[in-house]
Image (cartoon, grey):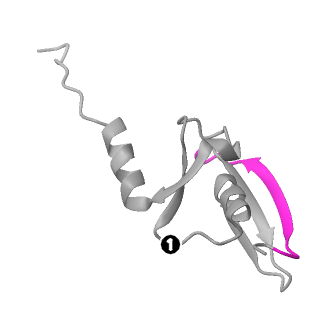
């Protein structure tokens, strides 16, 4: 079982990016910080995510961590989806 016999701390709001994080302390004393949605998904799937996998919020709200709002997608797909949201905008300079 994923994170069996581990201590769980969190979730807490990260000041850096305003997303939920947590800390897992393993039985040997080592600690791992990770995103709260990633933790939820790994527990739900009962496996660790692959290095190429990430958790995506279906509704776009990073604070809505209901398991039904989370899905696993490839990092490549996630980057592509983010690039579409951040498309170029053409504006006219107000001084010109």
Residue 33 image position (x, y, % from top left): 69, 65
Residue name at image x 17 percent, y 18 percent: 93
Q: Is residue 18 visible?
A: no
Q: Quadrant of the N terminus?
A: bottom right
Q: Is residue 58 visible?
A: yes
Q: Badge 1 local density, few (<14 within 10 Å), some, or many (20+)?
A: few
Q: Is residue 90 above or below residue 29?
A: above
Q: Quadrant of the C terminus?
A: top left
Residue name at image x 85 percent, y 73 percent: 6
Q: Residue furthest left?
A: 96
Report whether 2 appears left or right of 86: right
The stretch in magenta equals: 4-17
Residue name at image x 75 percent, y 73 percent: 2
Q: Is residue 26 above or below residue 90?
A: below
Residue 14 image position (x, y, % from top left): 67, 48
Q: How many marks?
A: 1
Residue 53 image position (x, y, % from top left): 50, 64
Q: Is residue 59 above or below residue 95?
A: below
Report whether 92 appears left or right of 25: left
Answer with the quarter of the image where residue 39 lies: bottom right
* Residue 19 highlighted magenta (yes or no): no
Q: Which residue is mark 1?
A: 51
Q: Is residue 75 above or below residue 28?
A: above
Residue 37 image position (x, y, % from top left): 66, 52
| Disc 1, SS | loop
Answer with the quarter of the image where residue 15 lies: top right
């Amino acid at each position: 079982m994923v994170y069996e016999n581990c201590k769980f701390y969190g979730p807490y709001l990260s000041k850096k990016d305003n997303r939920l994080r947590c800390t897992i302390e393993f039985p040997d004393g080592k600690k791992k910080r990770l995103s709260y949605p990633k933790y939820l998904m790994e527990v739900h799937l009962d496996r660790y995510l692959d290095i190429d996998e990430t958790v995506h919020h279906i509704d776009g709200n990073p604070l809505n961590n209901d398991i039904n709002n989370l899905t696993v997608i490839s990092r490549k797909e996630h980057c592509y989806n983010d690039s579409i949201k951040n498309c170029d905008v053409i504006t006219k300079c107000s001084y010109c």
